[in-house]
Amino acid sequence: MVDRKVGLDYHHCKAVMSELAHFHALSLSMKRIDPARFKRDVSDSITEALFVIENEAWYRDYYKTASKNAIAMVKQTLPEGEMMKQCLENLQQFVCDSTFFSKMVYLVKPREPVAVLTHGDCWTNNILFHYSETGQILEVCLVDFQMARYGSPALDLANLLYCCTSLELRQNHMDNLLEHYHTTLIAAMIELERDRCRETVDTTATQPEHLREICLRFFDLCWKHSMSVLISFSGRVDHLIRTLLVVVAPRFHIGVFGLGNNLVRPAWRSEGLWALANHREASWWARLSLSRSIELIRCVCISGPGVFTLELAADGISRIGLREEMHRCGKFGLGLALDMIPISTCDSDQAPDLYVTSRDDVIMSEGEDVLSTPVWTCNELCRQRMTDLVKELVEKGDL
């Protein structure tokens, strides 16, 4: 277990992002493979434990105190000026006593088709690492799923990145970490759904019009049903590529960039991204973004020049979609950080009893209906991390 005060460095954070990607991929794939069972056993069986409107009165004073503490930290840390004014205004508006909890309730609500089973409490003390003798991370284990929820995968990512890492790490590596998460997510889904749909096409023997129909049907299937499809093509690669780029791409608003020297480079560009690299061993890799539904095409040579496999994973959330979810869930990460940053940075004798879980466990005065007071620590590390996060979100337009 990593020291909670230190937080996660790049290598540990990357390893956890991989673990979360594999975990989230299970939901996205099961949702398409067996939607009825997924609804019955997963989405309909998970109940939000914290951010439900029935808990608002119970947590009101707790988060009111945590919010005041956060505002005080920002005031103490930022120098007087326009940035301090903007940070305080935006923070105070977000943590407003009458609306804060309802905002958190709204943010955790599942949004299809990207909703997954999330860990729900993804912070340093709930993550175990197995190391080699040389200190290499061999395995990551997530523990304590009592706060699991059905919602956006970005809820787990925001929890991890905003509560367990430093500003320096996020500034230097956040884009790479999100890219790594998304690539791992797609790869895991391709592996999980590899046998769902297969079709073999000989591009040399197939008439051009028939080939166009096959390609259009292929993309229509993925577009309409968010399915992962595997098609093996053999024959003339350039014939297939021309069909995909010149006929299919315009219909789905795909832009073309960086084609290999021996392939046609269309003069047009449109929305989306197709990056195609041609290697000497006749292997091709392509990435495709269709709106927010289809993300990756992987073309791999399987038996020699001109014979390759096309794999397409429609994951329900593209890179653009993931970044939009991270933008939307930035406030959720801050909402968690109101008490998680103090908990992460406080001394051991200030740490709360995390096993207090109900009204019966709390000693209250007569007529009182409030949760125990959140951790308050005045150490410099806590003030700096809280201030860094607020300032970062303001500068990014997420707060």
Image: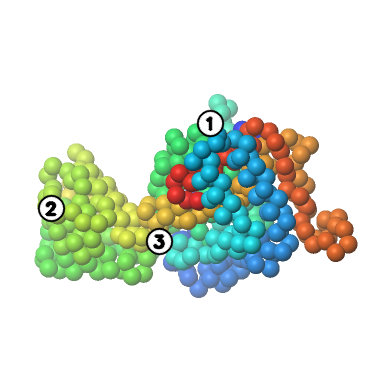
Residue 218 appears at what percent x and percent y? 26, 65
Cα distance in 3D space between marks 1 and 3: 33 Å
Image point (17%, 43%), residue name: 260
Residue 208 position (above or below residue 256): below
For the question of whether residue 138 can be seen, the reply is: no
Between 313 and 78, the residue placed more toward the observer is 78
Image point (17%, 50%), residue name: 306
Q: Which residue is mark 2?
A: 266
Q: Which residue is mark 1?
A: 136
Image point (50%, 51%), residue name: 399
What's under tag 3, amino acid-wise?
Gly
Q: Is the residue marked by circle 3 packed among few (<14), some (14-19), or many (20+) residues within 10 Å?
A: many
Image point (25%, 48%), residue name: 275
Left or right placement of residue 236 versus residue 125 in this view: left
Q: Which residue is mark 3?
A: 316
Extreme residue toward the right, this view: 366
Dot 3 lies on which element? Answer: loop
